[in-house]
Amino acid sequence: MSRTPSVWRNAGKGNAWYTTYRGQKKKIADADCSEQEAIDAWHQYNARDHAAELSHCNAVGTILDLYLDYLQGKSTKAYRDARTLLKTLGEWYRRMRVADFKAAHVRAWLADRSTWSDTTKATALAKLQAAFNWAANPDQGILDSNRLRGMKAPRQRSRGKEALIPPDDDEVIRRHAPRALADALLFIRATGTRPVNLGRISRQTVYLDQRVVVLEQHKTADKTGKPLLIPLPESVVPLLQGLMAQYPTGPLFRKRRGSAWTGRDLSTYFCALKKRLRRQGIKLAATTILYGYRHTLATNLLLGGLTGDQVGAILGQEGSQMVAHHYGHLLGHAKTLAGKMNAVIGPDDGSSDSAAARRA
């Protein structure tokens, strides 16, 4: 016997529609929704309890909501990124049964996102595929299979040979970046690691004798089941020694007020620095972006003779396939890789001494 919908407006929450789900008050619709829309949302919300029984008769929206619930308990960033893209899937698609949801509907959804680049569309498709793969996993047992499996994503344009930071721009940034940002950029420039990793580095993750940082939490941890190894060239050793002495516990790379850098913070501060320089009459190249440091290092290492597998290991990528995709125009463990990096970029570019001196 079906349950009777129970929805009401919550005056204390802007008159939004609420219900009680598993003993807790839950918002199910915005204030501008009608009562019928709130009731429809209630049915979708409560369908979660019967998702495993309904299998491909589930609404697409139910699968996505369950997947987002799962992500929210694992990673705030992964949840936020997936929600931002998947919420653009309109209500008409969300109410459709999974059994009726075809690749043509997905292509129509992506085609309607006229402001998205091919890279963003490919990312959105990957998030959608991840939701259906999760639901079809035997551990979940919600779907018998993922009927969207094998759908080809829009071809992503490689930025590897475009997003290179000119040496003159790099020198300007070195001179004008505030200390906390300069330290972060020095490490990114020398190691090529993803900016998001800086907030995860602590004294406990740094092994200077082995010239490596070991991170258990990283972008591909769930996929690889392995820790991320960041080889350390000599140019970052004085910087890390100073930070480890300053912060014996907690993150090493921090903003001026003491909180850890996040990838989003670094991007925001980097863009703010470029704007400040532009107001001073100093215009940097369009390719001078935060991720440009990663691309620039990879390019220099490949030109210096390292193999695709070696550069992939330095960048924290499995195998050389991704390296070949981004840097194929150049192509013709930890302690060893660090040594090879030194041979290409030199033991010290001068910036580490200045960073240590500022801290002394």
Image (tube, rainbow, N blue to C red):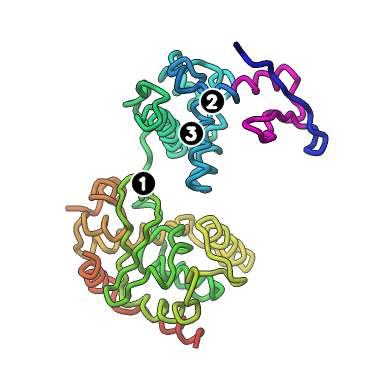
Identity of the residue drawn at 64% across and 16% down: 3
In the picture as drawn, the residue positioned furthest to the left comes out as 332
Q: Which residues are magenta?
A: 16-44
The answer to which of marks 2 and 3 sits earlier in the sequence is 2
Q: Nearer the viewer, residue 100 or 348?
A: 100
Assess disc 1: are there few (<14), some (14-19) or many (≥20) residues with their C-alpha within 10 Å of its C-alpha.
few
- Determine which residue is flagged by label 2: 48
In this rendering, would 110 be left or right of 331? right
Give the residue type at disc 2.
Arg
- Determine which residue is flagged by label 1: 222
Q: Please say whether residue 20 is one of the residues in the magenta stretch.
A: yes
Give the residue type at disc 1.
Asp
The answer to which of marks 1 and 2 sits earlier in the sequence is 2
Cα distance in 3D space between marks 1 and 3? 15 Å
Assess disc 2: are there few (<14), some (14-19) or many (≥20) residues with their C-alpha within 10 Å of its C-alpha.
some
Give the residue type at disc 3.
Tyr
Cα distance in 3D space between marks 1 and 2? 25 Å
Q: Nearer the viewer, residue 200 or 309?
A: 200
Q: SS class of the residue under badge 2?
A: helix
Above-or-below relation of 213 to 75: below
Number of the front mark, 2 or 3 = 2
Mark 2 near mark 3, Cβ–Cβ under 8 Å? no
